[in-house]
Image (tube, grey):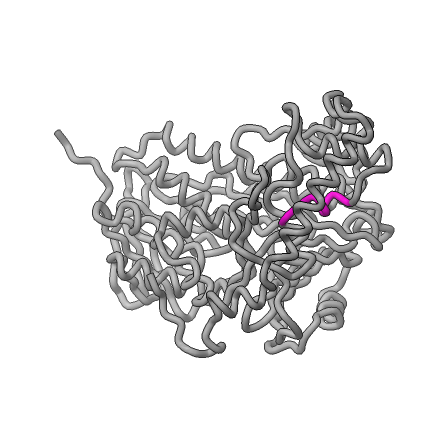
Amino acid sequence: MTDDRIRDVVIVGGGTAGWMAAAALSATMGDRLRIRLVESDQIGTVGVGEATIPAIRLFNGLVGFDENAFVRATQGTFKLGIEFVGWGRPDQSYMHGFGQIGQSLDLIEFWQYWLRARREGVAEPLGDYSFNQQAARLGRFGRVPRIPNSDLDGISYAFHLDAGLYARFLRGIAEANGVVRTEGRITGVARDGESGFVRSVALESGEEIAGELFLDCSGFVGLLIERELATGYEDWTRWLPCDRAIAVPTRNVGAPRPYTQAIAHPAGWQWRIPLQHRTGNGHVFCSEFMREDEARALLLATVEGEPIAEPRTLRFTTGMRRKAWNANVVALGLSSGFLEPLESTSIHLIQNGIAKLISHFPDRGFAKANTDAYNRRTAYDYERIRDFIILHYHANQRPEPFWRHCREMGIPDSLRDKIELFRATGRVFREQEELFVEVGWFQVLTGQNVEPETYHPLADVLTREELAQFLQDIRDIVASNAARLPSHADFIAASCAAQPAGAPAGASV
């Protein structure tokens, strides 16, 4: 019987995508694979994705390392959600918090009761019923899987991290697992004359590195997936018109918030991501509505601390490769596509691509049905995250020309269907394996003033007094338990304080 198992995997490019792939594959399949990663210190990484979502904890568990060591090594902080400032109307803000809100009852979600209670004047703001949001507003954090003496979930959390330090941390783990790193710039690609598959890459030094499966983690350039294989790119600028970002780190001015901020500006938005040693800031904007010098000046005028580096500009086209897997090349990270970091999905899409690759891991026959299934699933993930991000832009009441354009533009049918269902019934349904669950959609829709005409009829089973008491009990439980948590800063100091910036930060497994 012929042994068609793949033995040699070559990862082209390091950074977050390359080292995440190296760490995950070496942790799960390392005894079956020879993994080689090629990167050049002369080529910089983008590194704008410094905020994550809770699913990253699954990846960290898969690779297998201590969470406190990871936070310490990446100058990390904890993240309970994202505060959106000025996205509905300029004077409004809301939070998309992770985790549960309230408690489901009689087969329907808590927020159906909240919709009724709001209509009857007995509801507080939605965030008052969220443990995550209450803790975030108080600047508190703790690892609490369940609120004691209740049926309510505890804290759901992710991380803010320095992406460069995260790659360094993962490199230590991957190399300890046997991954071989080669320093060098790729100058050529050899392909099989019959199949068109990539056979090897040539380095500036003259070395040739052969492989059976290649992972393209080379960033926007897509060295293999696009330059060599000409896979093509699906441009989503018509729905997501921002095409520039200016990033600058600043000194911290106080204790780090346990949440990300996304602050709307006249032609885009600004992120604030608090780390232990600095704050990451950036201004995502549309060059059709704002000049780069204006965008830079606005960013520098609105950061909270002193800049510690020169602002740098990134140019991008939102969209995805027509195939994330072409021939024997799988694109991960920016090589596979780009969605702006509004909902912190950049690192998640890398993680998602790796998980699907492990699920669909090929043999040397590279069955077309397997490759096609991977591409369908990956495209679906991109498209549904795309819709969620478009929602933030489309559902606005701001007066500026950029925001009017976003409000009036056409949107994908898949998003239009969701909005129309919510307007008519107050209901949201998660389809297949899409990333964002119903409670996430609900928070953004209501936070940006999309008003449903009604609510689920089962929410009428309670009397008005019972309804008011039901909501008040949840609010009291959430508030009292949030107040008992340690401050975010104290929690970090006690469990995972990082070394001063500039000190060596090796991986600790």
Q: Nearer the viewer, residue 225 or 395?
A: 395
Whether residue 238 can be seen here: no
- The image shows residue 493 at horizontal and vertical percentages of 51, 70
Whether residue 137 can be seen here: yes
User: Which image quadrant is residue 300 in?
Assistant: bottom right
Does 54 sit left or right of 446 as displayed? left
Residue 204 inside the magenta-drawn segment? no
- Could you tell me which residue is drawn at 80 percent across and 26 percent down? 463
Q: Is residue 59 above or below residue 422?
A: below
The residues colored magenta run 125-131
- The image shows residue 413 at horizontal and vertical percentages of 68, 29
- The image shows residue 256 at horizontal and vertical percentages of 61, 67
- The image shows residue 261 at horizontal and vertical percentages of 67, 58
Q: Nearer the viewer, residue 136 or 26?
A: 136
Quadrant of the drawing holding the N terminus:
top left
Q: Is residue 472 above or below residue 482?
A: above
